[in-house]
Image (cartoon, rainbow, N blue to C red):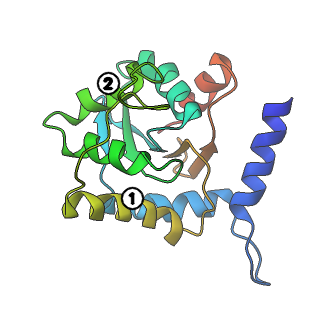
Amino acid sequence: MIRKSLGTLLLAACVAAPSAQAAPSPEQLADAMLQQMSRTTAITLGSGHRVVDVFFDPNCPYCHQLYDDLQPWVVRQGLQLRWIPVAVLAPSSQGKAAAMLQAPDRRKALARNEDDYDENPQAGSGGGLVPAAQVRPATADELARNLKVLHAAGAYFAFPMMVWRDRSGQAQMFLGAPRDEAQLKALLATVR
């Protein structure tokens, strides 16, 4: 019940507009983001035709939960997960996101961040990757573009944020980690 209320509050905050104009619907925000996905830099898991974009912060505990919950689905049902890193939650988020994007194998770096979540003393709390000692200018630009997609769409973000097109072609958005396997299964069943 609390999680449902929190999700409702986050969704309300997501669509709140400071102007007198009508607030965009969650579907309109999701559509605006999906139209700009080519500008993002993502770490792709799976190779299926059914695509879910996931905005995440390397230090986000709910993102970590979603990552774990989605692992069995990567090879099921032709699903492709595009993990889009942003750095907003902690001072080490930028360095950890950069470490992923600068790694020779980004998928392995993402897996290490999540598999060692809160277990690597050298990484500090949150994600298990040690922050990059230096963030290359190109990497900083990639992270800035990822965040800009959220801002340009008018979204006040919460993490994780999943965005996809449903079977009818409508853009959909889900904020936070699903409360249980049944909710996750129901969400993924709608992915086109």
Residue 173 falls left or right of residue 179: left
Which percent across, then down, holds residue 32? Answer: 51, 65
Which-is-in-front pick, marks 1 and 2? Answer: 2
Q: On screen, 33 above or below 129?
A: below
Q: Tag 2: residue type?
A: Arg
Which percent across, then down, holds residue 141? Answer: 28, 65
Which percent across, then down, holds residue 110? Answer: 32, 31
Q: Residues within 10 Å of mark 1 (few under 14, many from 20)?
A: many
Residue located 44% across and 18% down the image? 119
Image quarter hosting the N terminus: top right
Residue at which label 2 appears? 112
Q: Secondary structure at mark 1?
A: helix
Residue 105 falls left or right of residue 13: left
Residue at which label 1 appears? 146
Q: Nearer the viewer, residue 125 or 113?
A: 125
Residue located 56% across and 52% down the image? 170
Q: On screen, 91 above or below 190?
A: below
Residue located 18% across and 39% down the image? 103
Q: Are the residues flagged by discs 1 and 2 in contact, CB closer than 8 Å?
A: no
Mark carried by residue 68: none
Q: Tag 1: residue type?
A: Asn
Q: Which residue of the protein is positioned furthest toward the left in this rendering?
A: 104
Residue 122 appears in which quarter of the rendering? top left
Residue located 31% across and 34% down the image? 130
Q: Secondary structure at mark 2?
A: helix
